[in-house]
Image (cartoon, rainbow, N blue to C red):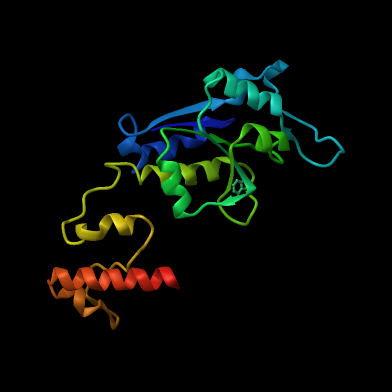
Amino acid sequence: MRVDVFTQVPHAFGWLTEQKPLATVLGSELELRFLNYRDTTPLRSGQVDDDPYGGGAGMVLRVDVVDAALEAAYGGDRPARIVALTPQGRSLDQAMVEELAQESELALLSSRFEGFDDRIVSHLATDAVSIGPYVLSGGELPAMVVLDAIARRLPGALAEGSGEHESFSAELDGGLEYPHYTRPAAYRGWEVPDVLLSGDHARIDRWRRDQSRSRSLA
Ligand code: ADE
């Protein structure tokens, strides 16, 4: 799939793209582009934001600037999903991640300052997504969260399982989780569940399934 991230701070994504799972899928399953609103703004001196009508603190990302960025990237052929990252959006969950990971093309719009001119969200974007009920200083961290969550759902992103739990790893990677333990088997009296030391992979599989079910219901 191709993901285009519209941002004023493309360099903020450097770390993420060097890490797994992004690094693993980049150039194969994932094509990633960073597009800076400043490069395509119709305004002078790279201006992208403005004072809010009605007054108030902070600056607002302009609708004409975002439209120009989309026009430069796509012309009339815009991706089916254009996601604005905003705390007012729909809460990101694993189901939405799975849904977005199915797209062949995706655009993520981030903003800094006080956020978007609302017409960006209502007319230019197809989706508004929040990564949680708190307000961050910009959409870059939320865009990274979405990117990471999508990248690990792409084919080849995750290392193959050791073989023990491959029978249901796809289901687990889809969002369910079971508890993990490693050496030592006992530490300060805190013991690893016996079943994991049993070597009985069918039993281990069953136990992990039960654990992830009870966790997902919690
Ligand atoms: N921009 C600022 N805060 C945000 C949040 N919680 N989710 C998505 N985008 C945001």
Is residue 117 among what the camera can see?
A: no
- Residue for point 52% across, 22% down: 77
Q: Quadrant of residue 202?
A: bottom left
Q: Residue furthest right?
A: 54
Q: Residue furthest left?
A: 199
Q: From what the image shows, is residue 179 above or below residue 109?
A: below
Image coordinates for residue 120, horizontal then vertical, percent? 67, 34
Front residue of 49/14: it is: 49
Front residue of 154/42: it is: 154
Q: From what the image shows, is residue 197 above or below residue 92?
A: below
Number of dots carrying numbers: 0
- Residue for point 60% across, 23% down: 69
Image coordinates for residue 213, horizontal then vertical, percent? 36, 70
Q: Is residue 54 left or right of residue 135?
A: right
- Residue for point 49% across, 42% down: 144
Image coordinates for residue 188, horizontal then vertical, percent? 30, 81
Image coordinates for residue 190, horizontal then vertical, percent? 30, 80
Which quadrant holds the N terminus? top left
Q: Quadrant of residue 126?
A: top right
- Residue for point 32% across, 67% down: 178
